[in-house]
Amino acid sequence: MLHVIARSALASACLVTTRASGDGASTRKIEPPVVEIMRLPEGGVQPQAVVGADGSINVIYLAGDPAASNVFFMRSTDGGRTFAKPIRVNSTPGSAVAAGTIRGAHLALGRDGRIHIAWNGSMQTHSGGDPQAGGSLLYTRSNEDATAFEPERAMAIRGLDGGGSIAASDAGQVSIVWHAPPSGKTGEQARRIWLSRSGDDGETFDEPVAIDAPPRGACACCSLRAFMTAAGDLFVLYRTAATPSDRDMTLIRVHAEEIDLNLIEPWPIGQCVMSSASFVETGDGVLGAWETKRRIRFASLPGQSDDSSTEIIEPAGQGDNAKHPVLAVNREGAILCAWTENTGWAQGGDIAWQVFEPSGAPIESAAGRAPRLPVWGSPAAFARDDGTFVILY
């Protein structure tokens, strides 16, 4: 049974130093990698991309009515140079939500490359139109060769708002994570972080358990992000709401049957910021990226070594209202961080990016921007086997 380690108070913050990426940069060790920009088919938005153990590029995205979208999956076997024709994931048409940018589909690869997907169900399809109930959290998985998906299953959740997430491992573990208030309670301060786990490749799931002790609430319309390492450790980044003016980025790490919480970075602001987060695993551990004070930050996450001081890196040259970061790492260990700028409610914007050394130092002449991010859009990123980065939006 899961239990919380005694030391896991939020006071055990590990990330305390912040520097802009242009400060104190070391001598560049690798050549600036090529960064290519790729648009989704048919006006798609909110992609998620995962590279399989076989080198395949697996992508999901949303398309259609923002309030009643469809989830599509496409795969590339040539490093993302070409993709097979997209197939629809959701068996119920219009059962996904693109509006708000943070309630879309999340993708994970499990045993033998099996595709696992979770997303917030659209209100009119899965909650009878009751705005107090929130949509259902939906889950599906692919067949063995990823040519079709099972009918989605709805998890019985009341009060779902910001998007849930999913993580999986080669050992057949699948974890679905979300935030919602316990039965009979309402409000952001009452919201908990819930985990439902499967040990049989998503065939069955355990009853949900809360994994955020001591509870600090959750920013209702902020997304959270789950990630499982090759070793089976589960990482979750989410934004707390202990008071109406506290929106602190917090990390939960589930290792075996123990849970550890760490304050990553505080953000005193009295509003829901509709933020999201991202993970990537490197040869040295797990990196996480998030938003604080409308700026994008990333760092190596605590709990992976005895080093208790990890530097937060803020990419230089960020524009207005930087949001929705994504990370990717190539074969040389270079780190791509991409994000959105100038977006708003029902308003598109731009994509920006910076590439860094494995040490976190920025690589000269390895930054850029791309315009015409669609309404409700956000990026995904992956690295090809030749070291090239691709930003997909």
Image (tube, rainbow, N blue to C red):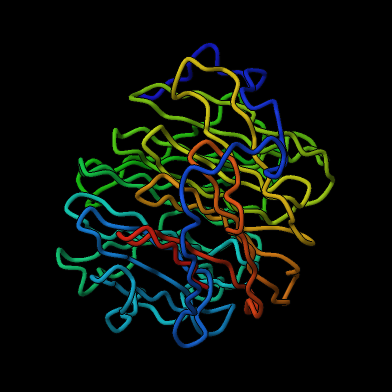
Q: Nearer the viewer, residue 228 or 160?
A: 228
Image quadrant holding the N terminus, namely top left
Q: Position of residue 173 (x, y in %)?
A: 26, 42
Q: Position of residue 309 (x, y in %)?
A: 60, 20
The reply, left or right, for residue 204 in relation to residue 25 is left
- The residue shown at (52%, 11%) is 6
For residue 282, what is the image quadrant? top left
- The residue shown at (73%, 45%) is 292
Q: Is residue 190 visible?
A: no
Q: Nearer the viewer, residue 295 or 98?
A: 295
- The residue shown at (56%, 33%) is 251
Answer above or below: position of 271 versus 229: below
- The residue shown at (76%, 52%) is 294
Q: Is residue 130 visible?
A: yes
Total label count? 0
Q: Nearer the viewer, residue 285 or 107?
A: 285
Q: Position of residue 185 (x, y in %)?
A: 65, 42
Q: Nearer the viewer, residue 143 or 318?
A: 318
For residue 131, what is the image quadrant? bottom right
Answer above or below: position of 29 versus 15: below
